[in-house]
Amino acid sequence: MCRGSGRPGRDARCDLRRRVRVSTTLLVIGLLAAGCSGAASPPDRLTDVRAARQFESFALYWLGERFEKWELTEIVGLDERTEFVTLVYGDCEPSGGLQPSCTPPLEVQVFPLCPHLDVVARDPIWRHRRIRGAPVGTIDRAPVLFTAGAQVKVYEGEDADRGAALRALRALRSLNDVPPVIGPAARIPAPPAGILSQERRCTVGG
């Protein structure tokens, strides 16, 4: 059961699982309707990508329309008031009785840099671990990469091997034009000195 934990990563995963349950219900309704009026229309992933490219609230990063064996299947949270955006890679088969749910292979969650930073950066592992120049911490057993403008968490779900999340962080590139804009192999700018250690007040990206 998902309960509010006060941890942004865990609460975000609970929210996504609820969305998966709702999506499953809608899928069943759609299939029933399709039996009467033809095939159901699949989600328009290209519409999601176009909307994400125009998103201006904070920097978004992704793995492209496909990462390894997983296609981008959904982008959740593209709203001006959103606290984070989730990019879902791969599909899963819901199970569990009356309220079936499942965890997709990869969930890439992008937050502005500042919110909940005292919790997310509490584990000092980020002092010793970097990917493409940016520090990498851990929360809820998932890696979180700190850029100059955002936090990027990657959760491994069903069908993902151990290490897929770190490989995903190494493959990050910009999805929209909000700085810092990075290419798939470029160095990732780290947050300003003293921000993660809370020696300086965070005012970047939120």
Image: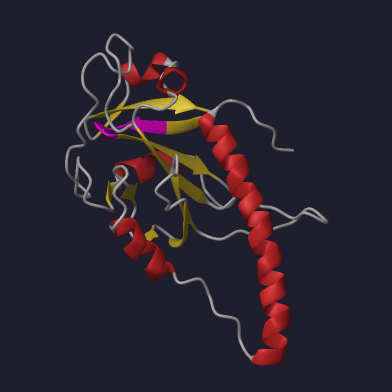
Image coords of residue 113 (percent x, y): 34, 30
| Quarter occupied by residue 180 | top left
Q: Is residue 109 above or below residue 22?
A: above
**For residue 134: magenta?**
no
Q: Identify the residue at the far top of this view.
A: 199
Tell me, yes or no, if residue 65 can be seen here.
no
| Quarter occupied by residue 24 | bottom right
Tell me where the magenta segment starts and ends, as one range: 144-149
Compared across the picture, whether 156 is left or right of 113 comes to right
Q: Is residue 168 above or below residue 54?
A: above
Point 55% across, 39% down: residue: 12
Tell me, yes or no, if residue 186 can be seen here.
yes
Image coords of residue 156 (percent x, y): 52, 43
Point 67% across, 85% down: residue: 34
Image coords of residue 46 (percent x, y): 38, 69
Compared across the picture, whether 141 is left or right of 176 comes to right
Point 45% across, 26% down: residue: 138
Q: Is residue 33 above or below residue 188?
A: below
Q: Nearer the viewer, residue 17 or 53?
A: 53
Point 24% across, 25% down: residue: 191
Q: Nearer the viewer, residue 23 or 157?
A: 23
Image coords of residue 69 (percent x, y): 44, 61
Q: Identify the residue at the far left of this view.
A: 186
